[in-house]
Every structure is written in structure tokens, then in C-alpha cells.
Amino acid sequence: MSDDLLLLICTAGVLAGGYRIWQTSLDTREAANRIAKDTCSRAVVQFLDGTVAFAGLRWTRDATGRRRILRTYTFDYTSDGFERAQGFIVLAGLRLEAVGLAGNPS
């Protein structure tokens, strides 16, 4: 009986951890979408496709020495309605680390 209980507890822990990772990923993607829309609006360019694309993640250390995950997202935009250019967003959790647009779409 104790083996079954241990298995149940371990399974619940794994599921809870997986759910937390999944929810964090969704939250950061939503934040990246808002930032991309705001950035395009401020730059007076058109945000294309209505969403960002996950480009990767890496570990880094913050000012206090804690390890953090940096997630990078890319998005497409246009200034003339014809040519696409790509921008990027880097988030540490939900905090914006960097955002950029290409000089001129070509």
C-alpha cells in the first residue's frame, strides 16, 4: 500500500510541476505579444501575423546572483505593407530585458 501512495504522490508532484512550467510559458508568451504590439504601435509599423514565435531560452544570473531563464521571442512587422522585417523580445520571467526592431525592412 505504501508503494502505491508513494507513486501517487510522485505522480501528483510531476503533474503539478509540469502544469506550472506550462502556465509560466503561456504567461510569458502573452506578455511578449503585448510588448510586440506596443513596440510596433510606438514605432508606427504594422505587427504581422498577430503573434510572436518562441526562438529559444538560456540561463543567466541576475544582479543578486540568482539563476534566471531568459526567453527570446521573434515577431514580424512591416513599415510599408510589402516587405517584412523581424523584431525580437527577451524576457526574464515576465520582466522585459530587451526589445528590438531591424533598422529598415528590406
Image (cartoon, helix red, strand yellow):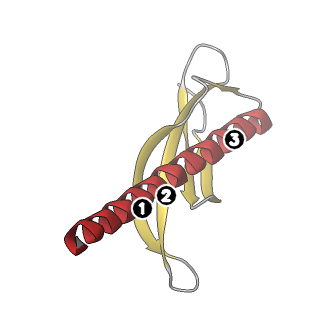
Cβ–Cβ under 8 Å for marks 3 and 2: no
Q: In screen coordinates, is 105 left or right of 71?
A: right
Q: How crowded is mark 3: few (under 14 residues within 10 Å), some or many (20 or more)?
A: few
The residue drawn where x is 71% and y is 28% is 45
- Give the residue number, with chain letter if any, for mark 2: 20
Amino acid on which disc 1 is placed:
Gly
- Give the residue number, with chain letter if any, for mark 1: 17
Residue at the extreme front of the image, as rendered: 1
Cβ–Cβ under 8 Å for marks 2 and 1: yes
Mark nearest the camera among 1 and 3 is: 1
Q: Residues within 10 Å of mark 1 (few under 14, many from 20)?
A: few
The residue drawn where x is 64% and y is 47% is 31
**Residue 91 placed where, x, y %?**
57, 57
Q: Distance between the residues labelled 2 and 1?
A: 5 Å
Residue at the extreme bottom of the image, as rendered: 64
Rendered image quadrant of residue 59: bottom left
Element at label 1? helix
Cβ–Cβ under 8 Å for marks 1 and 3: no
Amino acid on which disc 2 is placed:
Arg
The N terminus sits in image quarter: bottom left
Q: How far apart are marks 1 and 3 (CA)?
A: 26 Å
- Give the residue number, with chain letter if any, for mark 3: 34
Q: How far apart are marks 3 and 2 (CA)?
A: 21 Å
- 85 vs 71: above or below: above
Q: Which mark is residue 64?
A: none
Element at label 2? helix
